[in-house]
Image (cartoon, helix red, strand yellow):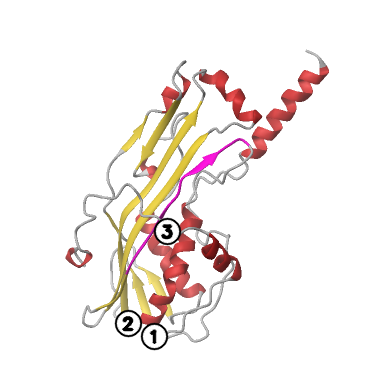
Amino acid sequence: MPATCRAGIALLAGLSLSACMTSVGKWTYPSGRYPSTASPRGSSARVVVQPFLDLRSDRNQSAMVWAYIPLSPYGWMHFDRPEAVVPGGLTIDYRADPCVDMARSLAVELLRQGVVEQASYASDYAEDPAATHLLRGRVLSFYDRESRFCYGLSTVGQAFWYVGLPMGTSSNGFCVELELLDRSDRRVLWRERIYDADQVVEGAYYGPEWMRFSWMWERRLREKFAGLATALGAEPAPLPPELERELRESPLPRLPESLGPDESTPMASTPP
């Protein structure tokens, strides 16, 4: 093989490897995208955060194999519960437990911003007798939808990825309803629905990571956090300039296309 061909192949291989360096396969919080900010005046509240109720749909389907069948233009997959998928060559591998991880992130953010005196996560739904508030929620959506383009040429079509054509599309979406209760009399002090969804074109050299849940959730959670801080008797922490600018420049949050079967059921009817 001529030296120029070998050099070209090596270059393409190196670029393809570098394009995968932003891949994220595990939930983390904080995401590391935004710096911390502190409340100017915290409260003496003691909050217990319970695991969220899982009210997502059960659709976990993959037709990714069609991307590699000659004359077929693309393959796709839609996972309403991406963490429950058996990982393989044609499926994703994403490690998360949304009902636990997103609930824990609330306790983390309350302490991170200094909004309350104490915030703890109760994995068994137990309530600390000394707690003043209870924070609970339900997950209506936490899905991943992907497509891959092989341009009707099966694996040969992947060569187009390395000349700049799209590899496919990626969409992440979530919807969580939160509720803060006064633990003494079960009065609802604050209620909010936090959600977002996106759809991006992915290429070998462009596009964000395939799984963006952590920073999408942090962005929208901190956007709404002022209301929770106020309900707890604290002064809200300011948003960091990076996040403030991103919220100003980004579109308004989009409600996910896929919501669970209990989407129309009022949250107050769910068990404590």
Q: Are marks 2 and 3 in contact (CB under 8 Å)?
A: no
User: Which SS class for mark 2?
Assistant: loop
Q: Nearer the viewer, residue 71 or 211?
A: 71
Q: Secondary structure at mark 1?
A: loop
- What residue sits 50% from the left and 28% below the top? 149
Label 3 vs label 1, nearer the camera? 3
State the separation of the CA atoms marked 2 and 3: 36 Å
What separation in Å lies between label 2 and label 1 (alpha carbons)? 17 Å
* Closer mark to the observer between disc 2 and disc 1: 1
The amino acid type, in three-letter code, at marker 3 is Pro
Amino acid type for the residue under numbered disc 2: Ala
Q: Residue placed at 53% from the left, 77% from the top?
A: 238
The amino acid type of the residue labelled 1 equals Gly
Q: Which residue is mark 3?
A: 253
Residue 70, compared with residue 170, is above or below; it is above
Residue at the disc numbered 2? 130
Image quadrant where residue 155 sits: top right
Q: Where is residue 142 shown, x and y percent of the image?
A: 37, 50
N-terminal of the pair, mark 2 or mark 1, is 2
Q: Which residues are magenta?
A: 192-204
Task: Report the side of 268 relative to 89 (left or right).
Answer: left
x and y percentages locating residue 256 in the rendered image: 36, 51
Q: Residue 233 has which mark?
A: 1
The quadrant of the rendering that contains the C terminus is bottom left
Sequence-wise, which precedes: disc 2 or disc 3? Answer: 2
Residue 20 lies in the magenta stretch: no
Q: Is residue 147 left or right of residue 130?
A: right
- Frontmost of labels 2 and 3 is 3
- As drawn, the residue found furthest toward the top would be 1
